[in-house]
Image (cartoon, rainbow, N blue to C red):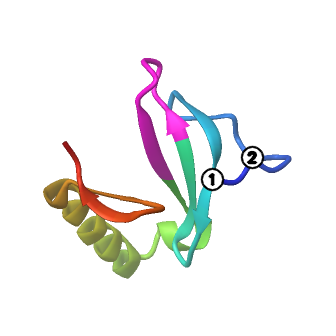
Amino acid sequence: MRPLRTGDRQTIGGYQVRGRLGLGAMGEVFYAQSRSGRPIAIKVIRRELADSPEFRQRFAREVAAMKTGRRVLDRRGPRRRR
């Protein structure tokens, strides 16, 4: 995890943003925590993609895969969540 940059949001959707996880073609991924301290990743989509029907379909497939796979990726590689 890398530190937040100047201008990065401190909260997204009620979650406290703690750092940066990555940057890709779709947007930026942040490490955040819920009020109870549960860790989560938040992907912030690039503005120019948000209105694209093709992008929305691709992103919907990504979300569906994440929901069914229940896989976690960390520095050690993929593993099953307990």
Query: Element under label 2?
Result: loop
Is residue 40 a member of the stretch shown in magenta? yes
Question: Which of the 4 quarters of the picture holds residue 48?
Answer: bottom right
Other-residue count near label 1 (Cα within 10 Å), few / some / many at <14 / 14–19 / ≥20: few
Q: What's drawn in magenta, residue-wise? A: 32-42
Left/right placement of residue 54 relative to residue 14 reads left
Residue 73 spot, x, y in % from top left: 37, 61
| Residue 71: mark in rendering | none
Other-residue count near label 2 (Cα within 10 Å), few / some / many at <14 / 14–19 / ≥20: few
At x 41%, y 29%, the residue is 38
Tag 1: amino acid: Met
Left/right placement of residue 80 relative to residue 24 reads left
| Residue 8: mark in rendering | 2
At x 43%, y 41%, the residue is 40
Residue 39 spot, x, y in % from top left: 44, 36
Query: Element under label 1?
Result: loop
Tag 2: amino acid: Asp
* Nearer to the camera, 21 or 42: 21
Quadrant location, the C terminus: top left
Residue 31 spot, x, y in % from top left: 55, 45
The residue pinned by badge 1 equals 1
